[in-house]
Image (spheres, helix red, strand yellow):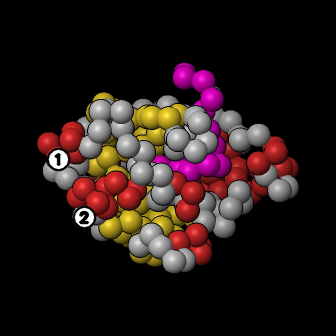
Amino acid sequence: MEELAPGIWHWAAPHPRIGIRVHSYYFPAERTVIDPIAPPEGLDRFAEHGPPSRVLLTNRHHYRSSGDFVTRFGATVHCVQAGMHEFEGGPAVEPFAFGDELEGGFVAHEVGAICPDETALFVPAHRALAIADGAVRFEEGGPLGFVPDSLMDDPEGTKDGLREAYRRLAELDFDHLLLAHGEPFVGNGREALRAFAA
């Protein structure tokens, strides 16, 4: 785990099911974790910084290691309403709606296009925007890209929809772009998203 900007911690670890490294973020002051995968060093570091009380998902597929945070810290897990069908019969997940301001000052924005529950979480206090699967960074230091066409039902239509959503999100006032798949952009995230959506 590393502090990539004041009040934002970042780490990456291999996802046991899909076999690639995925990225997660922790906001200690807000006691909030986004899209958590258990870090290689375990969960003890979280106890040192004030244990997380909530987990926010940028889409339903990012539950990842959320259950470990529920068991260890009693955290609650939250996903946008459009993805709640994934959790019928458990595990326990609480819904929110696009447009909601969540506890800790996280604002849920609709992305859609790639899946109905694709969500961006805007964190004004930390000048950060967290996004899910619509844009990824395959190489460290590289640009944003799309996932392979084989993962989209309508590749060109999906890409057009994502670009439209990201053009809208690039109007928000943020510096850091937090990716679920790839190294985050620190300081130049808004410019990177705007260029990608052009």
- What residue did someone put label 2 on? 74
The number of numbered badges drawn on the structure is 2
The percent position of residue 16, horizontal first and vertical second, equals 53, 41
Amino acid type, mark 1: Ala
Classify 29 as above or below 116: above
x, y percentage for residue 20? Answer: 58, 34
Which part of the image, by quadrant, shows the N terminus?
Answer: top left
Residue 38 coordinates in the image, percent (x, y): 38, 43
Q: Earlier in the sequence, mark 1 or mark 2?
A: 1
Q: Is residue 59 left or right of residue 54?
A: right
Measuring 25% from the left and 64% from the top, which residue is drawn there? 74
Q: CA distance from mark 1 to mark 2?
A: 12 Å
The residue lying at 54 percent from left, 23 percent from top is: 140
Which residue is more in the foreground, 126 or 52? 52
Q: Can the viewer see residue 9 in this picture?
A: yes
Q: Which residue is mark 1?
A: 47
Left or right of 15? Residue 1 is: left
Q: Is residue 93 magenta?
A: no
Q: Residue at x 20, y 53 (%)?
A: 51
